[in-house]
């Protein structure tokens, strides 16, 4: 039986639509043997998903997605095999979640100045206990009738360079790599197809452990290219659907973009080597 592994999934604990348990159910439906929950700036879904997945015979690798930047380039970093209970990691994640709230407040103020009556209470009610992000603001704008589609909110108002855009607080890639390493994990560049090759090279020189090779945004040519980069620089590879659900219109991606269990085994070997 083919081992199907999806190492890039978001839940309702950040900006995904489904609960950790619902994600596990969907993974079972798609015949995935192993998944990683990689929510933005939070590990809240990991324990819930792990416990529930045991009943269905699915392995859950603890993960998280951090935001970083290099010059003017935003860089997303996936972390795998982290210890969710690591106090230093949780201290950083709490800081990022607090900054998310402050950013949302600035966006709401800009939207108000543009004539859109949106409040932080609206955003908090939409996010509930999850890490607040722009998707929650977009959903509120859609439900209030300020935009016709979820994507219009981003394209016209809260997306990069738009009137109500506010930059997110980032840390340097090297700092992110150290946080991940100190918590027992491995760092990977998420969806590198969105970045320039020079940025990718600089991240490799900064000490990243691997690259996300399989991603919905990557063509077959890009996948081949990144596999070559992985081999050339002795890096690890990962892959997944970057599934969010809800208004993202990415339902067809789940179960369609996956990698093999051999990449997970390679990660474990690297972690063992790091301990020597």
Image (tube, rainbow, N blue to C red):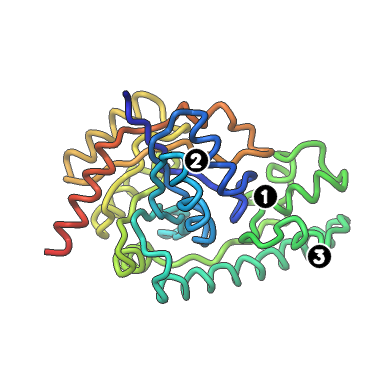
Disc 3 crowd, CA 10 A, few/some/many (<14, 14-19, 20+): few
Residue 227: numbered disc = none
- Give the image location of residue 153, x and y in percent: 74, 45
Disc 3 or 1, which lies upstream in sequence?
3
Secondary structure beneath label 2: loop
Q: CA distance from mark 3 to mark 1?
A: 15 Å
Disc 1 or 2, which lies upstream in sequence?
1
Are dots 1 and 2 in contact, CB under 8 Å? no
- Give the image location of residue 194, x and y in percent: 45, 41
Disc 1 crowd, CA 10 A, few/some/many (<14, 14-19, 20+): many
Are dots 3 and 2 in contact, CB under 8 Å? no
Q: CA distance from mark 1 to mark 2?
A: 15 Å
* Pick the front one: 105 or 184: 184
The residue at 23%/40% (across/down) is 230
Q: Is residue 150 left or right of residue 8?
A: right
The residue that mark 1 highlights is: 135
- Give the image location of residue 143, x and y in percent: 84, 45
The residue that mark 2 highlights is: 242
Outermost residue on the left side: it is 276
Residue 121: numbered disc = 3
Image: 220 above or below 14: above
């Amino acid at each position: 039986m083919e081992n199907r592994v999806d190492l890039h999934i978001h839940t309702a604990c950040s900006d995904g639509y489904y609960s950790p348990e619902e994600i596990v159910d969907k993974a079972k439906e798609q015949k995935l043997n192993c998944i990683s929950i990689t929510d933005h700036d939070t590990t809240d879904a990991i324990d819930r998903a792990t416990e529930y997945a045991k009943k269905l015979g699915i392995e859950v690798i603890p993960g998280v997605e951090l935001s970083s930047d290099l010059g003017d380039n935003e860089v997303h970093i996936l972390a795998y095999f982290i210890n969710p209970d690591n106090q230093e990691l949780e201290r950083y994640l709490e800081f990022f979640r607090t900054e998310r709230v402050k950013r949302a407040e600035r966006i709401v103020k800009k939207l108000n100045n543009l004539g859109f009556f949106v409040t932080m209470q609206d955003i908090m009610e939409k996010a509930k206990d999850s890490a607040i992000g722009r998707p929650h603001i977009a959903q509120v704008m859609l439900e209030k009738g300020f935009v016709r589609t979820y994507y219009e909110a981003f394209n016209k108002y809260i997306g990069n360079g738009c009137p109500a855009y506010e930059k997110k607080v980032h840390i340097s890639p090297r700092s992110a790599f150290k946080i991940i390493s100190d918590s027992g994990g491995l760092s990977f560049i998420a969806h590198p197809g969105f970045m320039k090759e020079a940025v990718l090279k600089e991240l490799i020189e900064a000490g990243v452990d691997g690259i996300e090779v399989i991603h919905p945004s990557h063509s077959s040519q890009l996948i081949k290219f990144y596999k070559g980069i992985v081999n050339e620089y002795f890096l690890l590879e990962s892959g997944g659907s970057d599934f969010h659900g809800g208004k993202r219109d990415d339902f067809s991606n789940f179960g369609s973009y996956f990698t093999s269990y051999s990449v997970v085994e390679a990660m474990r070997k690297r972690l063992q080597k790091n301990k020597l």
